[in-house]
Amino acid sequence: MKRFHRIVSGRIWLVLIVGTTCAVAGCSKVERPGTPTPGTSETAAGPKSDVAKLVPIEIKLPAPAFRGTPKPSKEPNVEAPLGKPRPAFLAPEGTVNLARGKSVAASDPAPAGGEVDYVTDGDKEASDFGYLGLRSGTEWVQVDLDRQATVYAVLVWHNHAEARVYRDVIVQIGDDPDFLDAVTVFNNDYDNSSGMGIGPEVGYVETAEGKLIDCRGSQGRYVRLYRRGNHMDDKNHYTEVEVYGRPVE
Ligand SMILES: [Ca+2]
Ligand SMILES: [Ca+2]
């Protein structure tokens, strides 16, 4: 039944939602193939001696699965959908998803739905049974990459069955599991309601393409992703998190 739903949803979207399947924010931070971005050049992404060839990272997208009529968002500072597929994101050759199968911790000791393992199990399809649901408020999940890595991009899917705008999307990378010392690579909390400072990034609409965050070669072992509900309800969902990088030698 789940499979049928995905197939039907996908076909409907192929017909009806052409031009919006990639309606995500963040595409402004990526470049066309062959055009190194500031965050993926050998000077910005790592040591100057790192002259690895830049290639598009390979991303396997889930099926588009919007259902129902989207509830208009009144959230301020939300960028318009790109209206076309997200351009390829370039990173040094050998960059892979380091998060797959890795252990996940969450701020909520008793998640209302799902398991923390869902965040890195590789299943990104839209399903009410496929996401980790955390309590309301500012909550986080944290992926342990097992070892320090140079991170070029984080890709996250919340609940992409609906066109939700998640609030206070904050992503940090650090070597300390308690994140007392970490680098913030994305923060779109415009009113500091999560108490971590006002962030410069804008909001975006959740879709099957997920949100790609340019991490510009930040190094660390842990990646933490905060949320504070979304424009439809106060729930925090995590379907999948991918961390594209290379282990530090
Ligand atoms: Ca998953
Ligand atoms: Ca906020």
Image (cartoon, grey):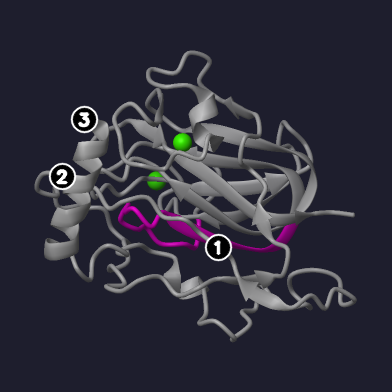
Give the residue drawn at x 41%, y 55%: 61
Q: Which residue is mark 3?
A: 1
Q: Which residue is mark 2?
A: 67
Q: Position of residue 35 (x, y in %)?
A: 59, 86
Q: Earlier in the sequence, mark 3 or mark 2?
A: 3
Q: Position of residue 241 (x, y in %)?
A: 52, 44
Q: Position of residue 213 (x, y in %)?
A: 53, 59
Magenta stretch encompasses residue 201: yes
Within-10-Å neighbours for mark 3: few <14, some 14–19, many 20+ = few
**Label 1 SS:** loop
| In this view, the mark in front (2 or 1) | 1
**Which quadrant of the rendered structure holds the C terminus?**
bottom right
Q: Nearer the viewer, residue 36 or 8?
A: 8
- The quarter of the picture where residue 123 lies is top left
Q: Earlier in the sequence, mark 1 or mark 3?
A: 3
Query: Which region of the structure is painted magenta?
Result: 199-218
| In this view, the mark in front (3 or 2) | 3
Residue 135 horizontal side relative to residue 153, left or right: left
Task: Indicate if the residue with disc 2 has its beta carbon within 8 Å of ligand 1.
Answer: no
Numbered mark located on residue 116 in the image: none
Numbered mark located on residue 58 in the image: 1
Q: Residue furthest top?
A: 110
Give the residue drawn at x 14%, y 49%: 70
